[in-house]
Amino acid sequence: MNTDNILLNNGARIHAEALQPADASQAASRPVLVFLHEGLGSTRMWKGFPQALCDAAGCDGLLFDRQGHGQSDPQQQPRTIHYLHRYALEELPQVLAQAIPDRDYVTIGHSDGGSIGLLHAAEQPERLRGLITLAAHIYVEEVTLQGIREARVAWDAGKLSRGLARYHGADRVETVFMAWNATWQLPAFAHWNLAYALPAVQVPTCVMQGAGDQYATVQHMHDIAAGIPGATDLLLPDCGHSPHLENPEVTQQAMLQVLQDWGVLA
């Protein structure tokens, strides 16, 4: 796995990290678990969850910071309402082609990362073996906007900048936050909808969401699964928008069971 010197066609450098399971004896024959972070996320914000899941599944893992996040190069262009499409259809294929060109993989995407995973899967990439989404979105709900407005209030009160700066750097944390927060509140973004892409997803898919997710209704999870042929959904207890951090043991076990049910760990 190559995680050094990943460069996009636009010249941006992408920070990526490779994970190996504690028992790597069967990792070469199993798919790589590719973790796609949330809208304000980075590789480091996953914390210990990816390594723990890779250890449990006996799979290699790949994490990377999307351009504009974490330790990757900053964005050079203003964000548009199509930013998730750009990440899914332009950036992600380039990262995969350089990091794991000859490996099968499963994407595990949180929030924005889940939406990116859905768009990527709809392109039917040859080596994709499965898709797990965690708190993904395919349209804009009022509860989503309310959570985003509350995040802006917390930002203006100085409650978020210091924490996020640890992951993105003090010099660009405001850019990262505003790009996410302002885009979702654009009038044009109210019509954003990915439902059209779901029938094209042809790999095993599990749509997961925390029972107390403050950014989406339970119906949202059901709608995603209903749009994908053969997909299942799973409501995770005792957690909100970040089940992998709020209830990691249950989330890990749920994902491990899904991978086993799909037969990709055989």
Image: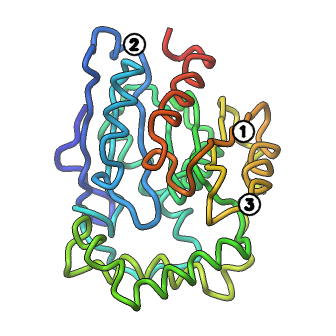
Q: At x 33% / y 69%, what residue is drawn? A: 68
Foreground tag (1 vs 2): 1
In x, y percent, where is residue 106? 50, 32
In x, y percent, where is residue 163? 28, 71
Q: Is residue 227 left or right of residue 31?
A: right
Q: Which residue is mark 2?
A: 29
Q: Which residue is mark 1?
A: 233
Q: At x 46% / y 30%, what residue is drawn? A: 105
Q: At x 35% / y 47%, what residue is drawn? A: 95
Q: Amino acid at mark 3?
A: Thr
Q: Amino acid at mark 1?
A: Asp
Q: Is residue 120 left or right of residue 66?
A: right
CA separation in Å, label 1 and label 3: 13 Å
Q: SS at mark 1? A: strand
Disc number for residue 217? 3
Disc number for residue 162? none
* Coloration mode: rainbow
